[in-house]
Amino acid sequence: MKKLVSAVTASSFLLLAACSSDDTANSSKETKEKLVVSTWGFNEDFFRNEIYAPFEKENNVEIVLDTGNNADRLNKVRQGNSDVDVIFLSDYYAQQGIEDNLFETIDRSKLSNLDNIYEAAKAPLGEEYGPAYTIAQFGIAYNPDEVANPITSWKDLWSEDLKGKITIPSITSTTGPMIVDTASLVSGEETFNENKAFEQLKALMPSVVKEYGQTSEFVNMFAQGEIAAGPIMEMYFADLQEAVPNAEFVTPAEGGYAVMNTMNVVKDTDQKELSEKFINYILGKEAQEKSAKNKVDSPVNTQVELTEEEAEGLTYGEDVIASLHTLDMKFINDNLKSWIDRWNRELVQ
């Protein structure tokens, strides 16, 4: 009988131990916080495995992604149709979010890595809002086999050599307003002049095969020989080179334009502190270096050191960043509607 009692007791102990273990595991799952991050869908596997996973492990948090393009994701937040904590947006769209009062102000004392990023990236839309975690360059790509002379300047887009051979971004795209500013620059104006810009754009339109709204349209036209050149962000140049190996990317003599992707904390989140911790992590050397060496994003952290080969195709280095034009996004958003109306009236055939 003693043996039976001992066996029962042992079984009970094992059962209780198993239950206790299950309860602990379940408790761990239940206490794991969630951080909802709104971002683009590209390179998702890379970000999940190389960037997000270490943060999740270190902070006992689960990162949930809400992916899509800038406009759609911003609209979801605007309409209250999401539970997003942190949102990644280009500066052009982030400014709209700021004006719509969609973001929390940032506690910069929590962002220790700000000390190690380029000055231009620290507060592109004001001290109260999020930093840029990457800066892309907007310049010119062209096929040297299809043009008589090398392209070195924004003015070259207006040359006879490129009549009927170029594409430009749509005015409603992220880089569309940069073309308006470029046209003013080419006109010889030292400060932005809208009338001069539209005069120059009108002169440019006979050279334009088609306006592109998505980079894939540029790549397709370039690959099929429908165009020989056009303004594009350097981060997409690898796609062009894959289609046309001889393709070249140029920073125009007057300077390229900075396209900044920002991070902001969404209004009324219950994860503000964790969100700021995540933003600071993304600015850190480790995350920035991984993204750069995998050719995903150009680094803004000045501690990231790349070889010439590693830096190829990236917007990298103090001198390069300092040479880029930056636009006043508040001014852009204040004037964009009238520019779109004028573009459609005066330029669309």
Image: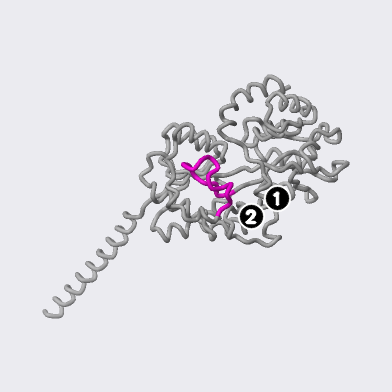
The outermost residue toward the bottom is 2
Q: Quadrant of residue 261?
A: top right
Name the residue carrying label 1: 238
Nearer to me, 252 or 76: 252
Q: Which mark is residue 222?
A: none
Circles 1 and 2, Cβ within 8 Å, touching? The answer is yes
Q: For the residue marked with disc 1, what is the amino acid?
A: Ala
Q: Secondary structure at mark 1?
A: helix
The answer to whether 110 appears left or right of 67 in the picture is left
Where does the image place residue 319, in percent across and percent down from the top left? 68, 52
Name the residue carrying label 2: 295
Q: For the residue marked with disc 2, what is the amino acid?
A: Lys
Residue stretch rendered in magenta on the structure: 117-134
Quadrant into which the C terminus falls: top right
Specify the principal SS of the magenta part: loop
Residue 127 is one of the magenta-drawn residues = yes
State the residue at coordinates (58%, 31%).
331
The answer to whether 343 appears left or right of 160 in the picture is left
Q: Secondary structure at mark 2?
A: loop
State the residue at coordinates (49%, 32%).
99
Nearer to me, 156 or 313: 156
Using the image, determine if residue 111 lies above or below residue 101: below
The answer to whether 46 appears left or right of 101 in the picture is right
Using the image, determine if residue 319 lies above or below residue 330: below
First reached walking from the N terminus: tag 1 or tag 2: 1
Disc tally is 2
Residue 319 visible to an observer of this rendering: yes
Using the image, determine if residue 33 lies above or below residue 157: below
Is disc 2 surrounded by few (<14), some (14 to 19) or many (20+) residues within 10 Å? some
Where does the image place residue 348, in percent across and percent down from the top left? 71, 23
